[in-house]
Image (cartoon, grey):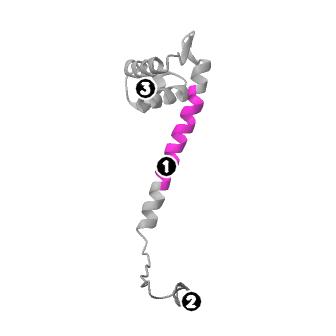
Amino acid sequence: MNFKHLYYFWVAAHAGGIVRAGDQLHVTPQTLSGQIKLLEEALDKKLFKKSGRTLELTDAGRLALDYADEIFSLGSELESAVRREQEVGTQSRFRVGIADSVPKAIAYRLL
């Protein structure tokens, strides 16, 4: 599965349509439709159905959207965790080296 295709589907589902999602992503509706079609082919399921001039999620589309919400939420958490780790990494650390010959109880009391 291509996560770019999943991301395009996710944005389109939350935007409520291909044109609005295309505006948000700065891609043409044709490009967006093509990418979503590739995802549908990979999943072997239709994710959207036409209802008049609008698109509605199919049952498979709602299921895929639930998973996509979770996937992109975890991606955001990952970015935050890495940023926090980088911030912690820039702080000074105090490291102490103790020879193996020094008993751990004494080293503990010294520190």
Q: Residues within 10 Å of mark 3 (few under 14, many from 20)?
A: many
Distance CA(mark 1)–CA(mark 2) = 38 Å
SS assignment at label 1: helix
Distance CA(mark 3)–CA(mark 1) = 26 Å
On residue 99, the disc is none
Q: Is residue 80 magenta?
A: yes
Residue placed under numbered mark 1 in the picture = 78
Q: Residues within 10 Å of mark 1 (few under 14, many from 20)?
A: few
Residue 68 placed where, x, y %?
54, 33
Q: Nearer the viewer, mark 3 or mark 1?
A: 1
Residue 93 placed where, x, y %?
43, 75
Residue placed under numbered mark 2 in the picture = 109
Name the quarter where the N terminus is drawn. Answer: top left
- Above or below, 26 against 51 in this view is below
Residue placed under numbered mark 3 in the picture = 22
Q: Is residue 78 magenta?
A: yes
What secondary structure characterizes most of the magenta part? helix
Mark 3 / mark 1, whichever is N-terminal: 3
Tag 1: residue type? Leu
In magenta, the rendered stretch is 64-81
Q: Nearer the viewer, mark 3 or mark 2?
A: 2
Count the marks. Answer: 3
Residue 81 placed where, x, y %?
49, 55
Q: Residue furthest top?
A: 52
Mark 1 / mark 2, whichever is N-terminal: 1
Tag 2: residue type? Arg
Residue drawn at (52%, 16%) of the image: 45
SS assignment at label 3: helix
Q: Residue furthest front?
A: 101
Tag 3: residue type? Gly
Viewer-closest of 25 and 44: 44
